[in-house]
Each structure stands twice: as C-alpha cells, then as structure tokens.
Amino acid sequence: MSSSDNRPFDIDEMICRYGNREISEEILTCYTEELRSQLRILSTAISSGRHSEAHRIAHSIRGGAQNISSPGLRDAAMRLEEAVKEKRTMPQVRNLYSAVEHEVLLLAEGVTTWIAGRNHEKSTLR
C-alpha cells in the first residue's frame, strides 16, 4: 500500500495481479459479500467447538485476504487459524475472532468507499 493510502487492501497490487480495475472491483465486491457468510459460519463453528471447520474457514479467509492484498485481514485470520489449530482457550479464540471481524468491517468500509470514489470519477468524466 502506498503511504498516502489508508485502505485495508492494496488496489495497485490487485490491478497488477488481475489486470485491471474492473476485475479487481468485482473480486473485492464478491469477496466482501462472501466474507459475511464465512464469518457467520466461523462464529458458529467456534461456539460449537468444531475446530476442524473453524480452522478450515480461517485458512480460507487468510488465503482470500492474501489474494486481495489485505495484509491486516490476512494476519488476523492467520492468528485465528493458528489458535484454533492449537485449541487455545475459548476467550483467546473469541478475541482473535473479534480481530478478524474488525478487519472484515474495515475491508467492507474500504471497498465501499473506493467503489463510491470510482463511481464518482466515472460520472464526472461523462
């Protein structure tokens, strides 16, 4: 991420990876929507003590975060993934889940703001 950019994802890195802004926007939008569902399932898995499922979902979130160049979410998901794998205490796991949830909210806000700015740019160019 550039120093002047406070988004929770690196759009320039995504554009390099995926080829253009439109594809990057679509990936960000779809992934953000999918994260909401993953968080619900992850929360249930954690509360129910289903460690394998929670580990798998945290791993999936970490991989997706890497794909969209979101280091904050990637790192939070990795810490949760490790905690679940090591079967740490429920309070520790819940705190790490909260950190992932916080990063997802930051990501969703960042994506919404970025897309709104892009739409504004498009409308002023017409």
Image: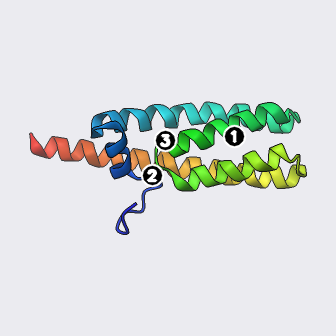
Residue, disc 2: 9
Question: Percent from the top left, x then y, of residue 106?
Answer: 52, 52
Q: Residue at x 42, y 57 (%)?
A: 7
Within-10-Å neighbours for mark 1: few <14, some 14–19, many 20+: many
**Proximity of marks 2 and 1: CB atoms separated by less than 8 Å:** no
Query: Where does the C terminus fall, quadrant-wise?
Result: top left
Q: Nearer the viewer, residue 31 or 2?
A: 2
Element at label 1: helix
- Residue at position x 38%, y 69% from top? 3
Instruction: Tell me how far mark 2 sits from mark 3, CA to CA.
Output: 10 Å
- Near-viewer residue (58 or 33): 58
Looking at the image, residue 62 sits to the left or right of residue 93; the answer is: left
Which quarter of the image is occupied by the N terminus? bottom left
Callout 2: 10 Å neighbours few (<14), some, many (20+)? many
| Residue at (67% x, 39% y) in the render | 59
- Left or right relative to 18: residue 122: left
Does 126 sit above or below residue 8? above
Where residue 80 appears, x then y in whole percent?
Answer: 74, 49
Pick whichever of labels 3 and 1 is earlier in the sequence: 1
Q: Which residue is mark 3?
A: 67
Amino acid type at circle 3 is Asn
Write the residue at 77% across / 36% down.
Answer: 54
Where residue 48 appears, as percent x and y from the top left, is 87, 33
Numbered tag placed on residue 26 in the rendering: none
- Residue tagged by mark 1? 58
Q: CA distance from mark 2 to mark 1?
A: 18 Å
In the image, residue 121 lies at what x, y percent? 19, 47
Q: Is residue 30 left or right of residue 22?
A: right
- Residue 115 seen in the figure: no
Left or right: where 40 falls relative to 70: right
